[in-house]
Amino acid sequence: MSPKQQRGEVTADLLLQAALRVFVEQGEQKVTVNAVCQASGVSLGSLYHHFGSIDGLFVALGHRWLGRMLEELTGSLVGARDARSGIEAVVAAYLRFTQEHRDAALFLHSSYAERYGWAQGRAIRDAQEARLSPVAAWLDPLVAAGEIAPLPQPLVESLILGPVVAVARRWLAGYGDVDLDEAARVLPDRIWQAVRP
């Protein structure tokens, strides 16, 4: 990689970090090109050069952190012996990611990310296909073997991740009534009841 490319990557990374920081510290309404440039120390021209717009910057931010989360979820399945232990691993990985990367989780669970996700759902899914394929590779044989109920894959994914996402959102909202460690202990059994044959 040339020095110019390295500088470009550093600049893009500074902008992404600053965008997340502004989002978390000031809220979605305060995220502007000027606020991100000021927080990053990067010029307006560089932001437009790398991302095209503030929306392009936040799309890249979403892809970055969604990719990291999916890598952790799929990585958690590597040692799973069976369907139930896989569910336990995915629940633990999701909640651990939420706790360890709170700012990124706030963004990924935000109304902005949700609006973008609905508008661009197919494109996001296609972009993440390579990262999601290990989940499908894990699920499909379990369904075929009768370890998981014979439901369409999107329904199984929703039954597994839906409750975990809801708990993560509640914890991120700061209600103070959810303990993620307790959720990691309780949810897998409840989810298993929903997806077992």
Image (cartoon, rainbow, N blue to C red):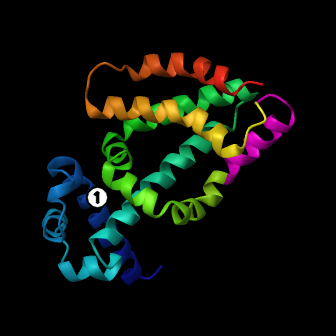
- Residue 154 versus residue 71: which sits nearer the camera? 154
State left or right for residue 144 relative to residue 116: right
Left/right placement of residue 95 relative to residue 146 reads: left
SS label for mark 1: helix
The spot of residue 182 in percent (x, y) is: 44, 16
| Left or right of 68 on screen, residue 141 | right
Q: Residue at x 39, y 75 (%)?
A: 6
Name the residue tied to disc 1: 17
Asked if the magenta segment contains residue 116, the reply would be no
Q: Position of residue 145 (x, y in %)?
A: 87, 33
Q: Residues within 10 Å of mark 1 (few under 14, many from 20)?
A: some
Task: Please give the range of residues in magenta.
Answer: 133-148
- Quarter where residue 96 is shown: top left
Q: Nearer the viewer, residue 85 or 140?
A: 140
Residue sitting at x 32%, y 55%: 112
Please name the amino acid that badge 1 sits on. Answer: Gln
Question: What secondary structure predominates along the stretch shown in magenta?
Answer: helix
Residue lying at 20% horizontally and 73% vertically, measured from the top left: 42
Q: Is residue 172 above or below residue 58?
A: above
Position of residue 174 relative to residue 121, above or below, is above
142, above or below 4, in the image:
above
Of the pair 140 and 21, the residue shown nearer to us: 140
